[in-house]
Image (cartoon, rainbow, N blue to C red):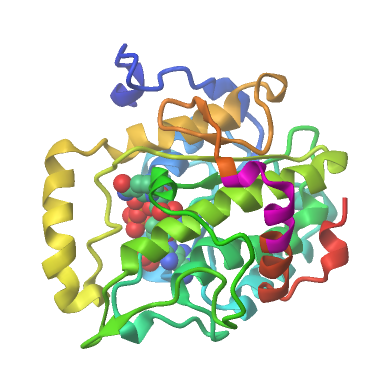
Amino acid sequence: MFSAFEKDSNKKINNINSNAFRGKTIICIGANAGIGLAMCDHVAQSGVKRLVMGCRSMDKGEAARSEIKERCPDLVVDLWQIDLSSLNSVRSFGQRWTEQAEDARTIDTLFLNAGLISPNTASSSSADGLEMTYACNVIGHLALISHLLPCLNSTDSRIIFTGSGAYMFTSLPSRPPPNKRTPLRDSWNVYGYVINAFAIYADSKLLLNVVVKELQQRLADKHIWVGVYHPGAVNTTITDKAHYGVSWLITYPFTYIMSYFGRTPAEGAAPGLHLASEPKENLPGGAYWNEYAQIELVKQAEDAELRKRYFDRCVEDARVDPAVFVA
Ligand SMILES: NC(=O)c1ccc[n+]([C@@H]2O[C@H](COP(=O)([O-])OP(=O)(O)OC[C@H]3O[C@@H](n4cnc5c(N)ncnc54)[C@H](OP(=O)(O)O)[C@@H]3O)[C@@H](O)[C@H]2O)c1
């Protein structure tokens, strides 16, 4: 079990304090595959009180839940539907959570792991008319936080985003452009394919770093810890989805290379699990952590004015009452 974590290599994270998960309530969004599933697997075997897997596909989610239940038959593992590309779906998840009995509502760790690259024109708009990658990788998560905020009230509540080192390939204009679909690059559609899908993905992950920094400042009074980490290059299903269709011509070579050289999902999950289990006092909040769980300075996230502009735009697009995030 967890052999990946036990390898003694300075390139891998092997200090996960699994005891820290004991008795906790953990939600993982994007839990049915890849890094999210590996995170769930780890915490499930570490004595959590309750694990909630947020998945957009109930079929895939049920298969993942069964896998975990097989190993941990006595654990409460809930499967809840959530599609980050729909603010209605996100709101339903939030409402369902807050309508539970009071003693079931408190969240210790919220893993916001779901993310996508959207290479097809057919899937380049969210249910709310936003550019899809922006909607799923940033806006859905922010909207979800706004709904769950009152429940992130344990003594050790943490919000941990799965980001990406791809952020370093891009930069944001100093002001969000006025495009109503996205403040990032919009999709360039050629014969049904989004040819700049990776560039939009990189934009979304840079924006995530900016949002995380601002969120941490605004949530500091509530004693909620926020961070974002890069899992490394990981062999997962991210570029291997049935609905990507013929764009496999682009994604197949990436998937093939990853199958040989990528980290395993368990290795990719390790920095996130480290951030979730290390005492908060040892972890500066609002930072971007690389795949070795070391902090990297993200220049644009340090720019307070740029940060506020983009955060306000995201709050607007997530249809969140700005008062929710007033520090
Ligand atoms: N793999 C890498 O090398 C790598 C590198 C850097 C960062 N990351 C980040 O790591 C995170 C996990 O990705 P992964 O590599 O493990 O890929 P993955 O296997 O595709 O997992 C992504 C998860 O997000 C879910 N998801 C996608 N769109 C969603 C939506 N609209 N609503 C709800 N859930 C949605 C997926 O559900 P479905 O199965 O239904 O699609 C899946 O469970 C992502 O944020 C990704 O950007 C990955």
Q: Name the quarter where the N terminus is drawn.
A: top left
Q: Nearer the viewer, residue 181 or 318?
A: 181
Which quadrant holds residue 155? top right
Which quadrant holds residue 243? bottom left
Quadrant of picture, ligand 1: bottom left
Residue 154 at x, y percent in the picture: 79, 39
Q: Give the residue displayed 72% in from the left and 76% down from the top.
A: 319
Viewer can see residue 307 = yes
Q: Give the residue displayed 11% in from the left and 56% down from the top.
A: 253
Q: Is residue 158 above or below residue 307?
A: above
Residue 168 at x, y percent in the picture: 42, 45
Q: Nearer the viewer, residue 261 or 199?
A: 199
Residue 194 at x, y percent in the picture: 30, 77
Q: Is residue 279 above or below residue 167?
A: above
Name the residue furthest front: 174
Answer left or right for 310 relative to 120.
right
Q: Give the residue displayed 38% in from the left and 77% down from the top.
A: 187
Answer left or right for 124 relative to 248.
right
Q: Is residue 13 above or below residue 231?
A: above
Most frequent secondary structure within the magenta stretch: helix
Magenta segment: 300-309
Q: In this figure, what is the number of numbered marks?
A: 0
Q: Nearer the viewer, residue 99 or 228?
A: 228
Viewer can see residue 31 = no
- Residue 209 within the magenta-colored segment of the rendering: no
Which quadrant holds residue 125? bottom left
Q: Is residue 277 above or below residue 41?
A: above
